[in-house]
Image: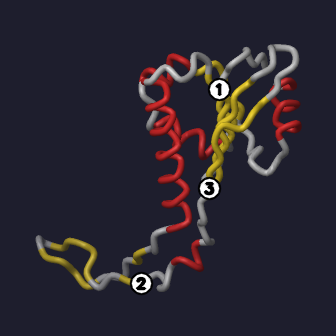
């Protein structure tokens, strides 16, 4: 993938975000960190205090609730926080696009995070989106991210 000079590159997952700027050229990207954010998001079992329960009246029979055996699942708080983090990241991108902070944008994120980001893009972000890579590179070095972009 070609990364134009001054392109904005976002590498994110559900808990870490890197905003990078290409200070190099198309053949030799030189990504510089503009912003980094890491959110503490413990595993779901550490965030939830209860186990799944059972509903006592869940089905309608003749217009009344019947005693039932329906189950209720606990919310996945870890996933909720990851989705919220992705939405917050998209909001930052929206603000920067509306302020004309970048002309070309490349997003690198795992498929689930990419999907959540897309839900929140402003039209200006969509118009500036030059490419997406569906990989989790948040734990990689800047040099490894540059190589992944070149190889894509």
Q: Quadrant of residue 5?
A: top right
Residue 111 locus on image (x, y percent):
65, 42
Quadrant containing the N terminus in the rendered view:
top right
Which residue: 81% across, 14% down? 26
Marks 2,1: beta carbons within 8 A = no
Q: Quadrant of residue 113?
A: top right
Which residue: 57% across, 21% down? 102
Depth check: give the residue in front, 20 or 46. 20
Can you name the residue that lies furthest to the left here?
Answer: 63
Residue 20 locus on image (x, y percent):
69, 34
Residue at the disc numbered 3: 15
Depth check: give the residue in front, 108 or 101. 101
Which residue: 61% across, 71% down? 42
What label sits on residue 53 in the rendered view?
2
- In the image, is residue 90 above or below residue 81? above
Structural distance between the alpha carbons of marks 2 and 3:
29 Å
What label sits on residue 8 in the rendered view?
1
């Amino acid at each position: 993938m070609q990364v134009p000079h001054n392109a904005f590159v976002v590498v994110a997952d559900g808990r870490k975000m890197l905003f990078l700027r290409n200070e190099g050229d198309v053949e030799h990207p030189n990504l510089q960190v503009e912003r980094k954010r890491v959110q503490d998001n413990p595993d779901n079992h550490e965030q939830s205090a209860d186990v799944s329960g059972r509903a006592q009246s869940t089905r309608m029979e003749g217009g009344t609730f019947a005693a039932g055996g329906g189950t209720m699942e606990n919310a996945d708080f870890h996933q909720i926080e990851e989705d919220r983090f992705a939405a917050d990241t998209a909001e930052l991108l929206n603000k920067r696009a509306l302020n004309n902070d970048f002309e070309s944008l490349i997003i690198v994120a795992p498929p689930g995070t990419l999907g959540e980001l897309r839900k929140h893009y402003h039209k200006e972000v969509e118009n500036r989106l030059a490419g997406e890579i569906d990989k989790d590179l948040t734990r990689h070095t800047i040099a490894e991210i540059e190589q992944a972009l070149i190889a894509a």
